[in-house]
């Protein structure tokens, strides 16, 4: 018999079914006489006997259990409600293994206004670190956990933004500005720098750290009584926000006193009580929105020793669209009909003013932002206007476009835009020298290394520079 014919003959004699083949492979007693590829009588006899289950049949058993929806017991404790989220949001702000950097100075109240500090890496003072942590300004995506203490690069944009804020303060007006830019260019970090400056200069800071928490339908909501057209409050979120404002701005709130009587409040707060007592009266979610409104009303009284306010939000796109909430009639609710969002957008558009000065800042985020055509259009119009283009040359909605939203465009009609790009080469060098001094970057920092990393990072995009230089520490 020729070789191919022999092979065919042998294969034909093999058991056809996979299960049979398995049994064959795992049959415990293999007669010595049994030839390979043979279905000889002794083997047939053996197959008729009951077989011990082999490893393969165990796999089948597990698969069966899985199909029935049983969870295999791994012996561990399953996480409690909220534990996974807390772990995801956990922020470490120091690393004792990183080297202390010599010559690193703390940011003072006027330092972020000073052009001399552009290109310097500076540390955040401990008191401000606590306030920033309370207001949830640090983000888990940033690289705080690999350095000895929270420090940041002062960029030219930082000084520019804070000088604009300072000028507005002098005019008793609020700067209304959107921070935009490509992915990981440092938009949230710039917002953090503005908030740090605000804390160091005794502003009251109201910060919404993740705008998506307001619009994705993850927190309770209820109609605001007597609101027409109806607005919706988010009691639990607002209670948490008041507690953060109270804790981070405690000293300032204790110094100021109320000038209105606020009869709607759940607790009697007589006129001339400290604002801290007013903030403390928010104990239950049910009364949180009324207390928040009363506190905001008190803080925005002109004069009376009221400090400037910084009202900020990260993740603007999430509140520039329909929310995931529904009315009782199952109609979708626009994000601008959520009371807290409405207050922010009114401040951003200038409909509600901050008479003691300050700023309303909104940062875009590119990480998980939804696409909002009206937002993109409004920002590109603002960019064109700032570049000095004539009204007739501004970008327009495409003809017959459906998914544009007048409410969004109205809010952004007069805001300023700060378009963030990469850092300059001297700024990049200073940052890399800080990384090297901290011991997290092990290479000689010279012109060539800086140029290489700067170019690799799309002309100095900070997050990309971190990827290129500190690859293992972040990703
Ligand atoms: N001024 C700075 N000093 C030091 N590190 C910075 C600075 N700006 C940004 N970074 C770093 O760059 C990374 C990206 O920053 P950030 O999270 O602020 O970017 P983003 O533009 O808000 O990102 P996204 O596009 O995802 O919203 C972070 O790890 C941050 O630590």
Image (cartoon, rainbow, N blue to C red):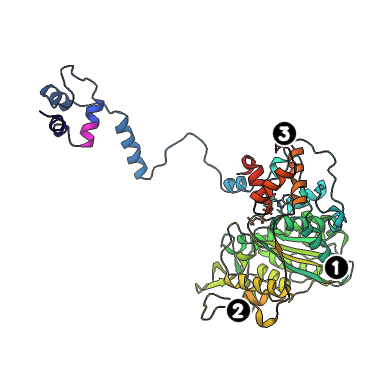
Decide if residue 142 is in sight here: no
Per the rendering, the mark at residue 223 is: none
Q: Nearer the viewer, mark 1 or mark 2?
A: 2
Q: Which residue is mark 3?
A: 97
Q: Percent x, y for residue 235? A: 65, 63
Q: CA distance from mark 1 to mark 2?
A: 32 Å
Query: Which quadrant of the structure image shows residue 240?
Result: bottom right
Q: Would you place residue 361 above or below residue 82 in this image? A: below
Q: Quadrant of the N terminus?
A: top left
Residue located at (78% from left, 74% from top): 353
Q: Quadrant of the C terminus?
A: top right
Q: Mark 2 vs mark 3: which is more N-terminal?
A: 3
Q: Mark 1 vs mark 2: which is more N-terminal?
A: 1
Q: Which residue is mark 2?
A: 396
Per the rendering, the mark at residue 167 is: 1
Q: Percent x, y for residue 416? A: 74, 70
Q: Secondary structure at mark 2?
A: loop
Q: Percent x, y for residue 264? A: 73, 71
Q: Nearer the viewer, residue 305 or 97?
A: 97
Q: Percent x, y for residue 448? A: 71, 44
The answer to whether residue 220 is left or right of residue 433 is: left
Q: Answer yes or no: do the residues labelled 1 and 3 have beta carbons within 8 Å?
A: no
Density class for disc 2 (Cα within 10 Å; few <14, some 14-19, many ≥20) is few
Chain part drawn in magenta: 14-21
Examine the structure image and report whether residue 17 is included in the region drawn in magenta. yes
Density class for disc 1 (Cα within 10 Å; few <14, some 14-19, many ≥20) is some
């Amino acid at each position: 018999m020729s070789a191919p014919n022999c092979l065919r003959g042998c294969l034909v004699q093999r058991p056809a079914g996979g299960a049979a083949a398995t049994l064959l492979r795992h049959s415990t007693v293999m007669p010595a006489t049994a030839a390979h590829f043979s279905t000889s009588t002794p083997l047939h006899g053996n197959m008729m006997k009951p077989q011990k289950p082999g490893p393969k049949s165990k796999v089948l058993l597990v698969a069966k259990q899985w199909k029935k929806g049983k969870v295999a017991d791994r012996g561990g404790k399953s996480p409690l409600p909220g534990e996974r989220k807390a772990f995801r949001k956990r922020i470490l702000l120091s690393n004792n293994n990183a080297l202390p950097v010599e010559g690193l100075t703390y940011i003072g109240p006027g330092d972020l206004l000073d052009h001399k500090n552009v290109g310097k890496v500076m540390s955040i003072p401990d008191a401000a670190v606590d306030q920033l942590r309370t207001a949830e300004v640090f983000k888990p995506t940033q690289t705080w956990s690999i350095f000895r203490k929270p420090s940041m690069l002062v960029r030219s944009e930082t000084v520019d933004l804070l000088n604009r804020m300072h000028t507005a303060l002098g005019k008793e007006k609020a700067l209304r500005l959107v921070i935009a830019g490509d992915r990981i260019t440092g938009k949230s970090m710039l917002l953090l720098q503005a908030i740090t400056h605000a804390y160091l200069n005794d502003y009251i800071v109201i910060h919404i750290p993740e705008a998506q928490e307001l619009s994705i339908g993850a927190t309770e909501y209820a109609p605001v009584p007597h609101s027409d057209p109806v607005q919706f409050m988010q009691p639990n979120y607002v209670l948490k926000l008041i507690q953060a404002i109270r804790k981070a701005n405690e000293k300032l709130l204790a110094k100021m006193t109320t000038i209105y009587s606020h009869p709607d409040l759940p607790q009697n707060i007589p006129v001339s009580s400290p604002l801290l007592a007013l903030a403390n009266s928010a104990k239950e979610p049910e009364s949180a929105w009324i207390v928040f409104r009363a506190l905001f009303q008190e803080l925005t009284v002109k004069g009376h020793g009221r400090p400037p306010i910084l009202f900020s939000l990260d993740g603007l796109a999430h509140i520039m669209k329909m929310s995931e909430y529904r009315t009782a009639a199952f109609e979708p609710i626009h994000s601008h009909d959520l009371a807290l969002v409405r207050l922010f957008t009114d401040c951003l558009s200038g409909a509600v003013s901050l008479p003691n000065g300050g700023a309303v800042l909104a940062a875009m985020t590119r990480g998980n932002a939804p696409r909002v055509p009206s937002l993109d259009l409004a920002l590109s119009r603002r960019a064109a206007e700032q570049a000095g283009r004539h009204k007739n040359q501004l970008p327009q909605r495409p003809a017959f476009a459906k998914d544009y939203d007048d409410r969004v465009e109205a809010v952004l009609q007069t805001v300023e835009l700060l378009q963030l790009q990469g850092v300059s080469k001297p700024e990049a060098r200073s940052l890399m020298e800080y990384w090297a001094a901290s011991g997290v970057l092990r290479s000689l920092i010279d012109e060539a290394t800086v140029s290489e990393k700067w170019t690799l990072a799309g002309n100095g995009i900070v997050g990309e520079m971190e990827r290129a230089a500190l690859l293992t520490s972040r990703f």
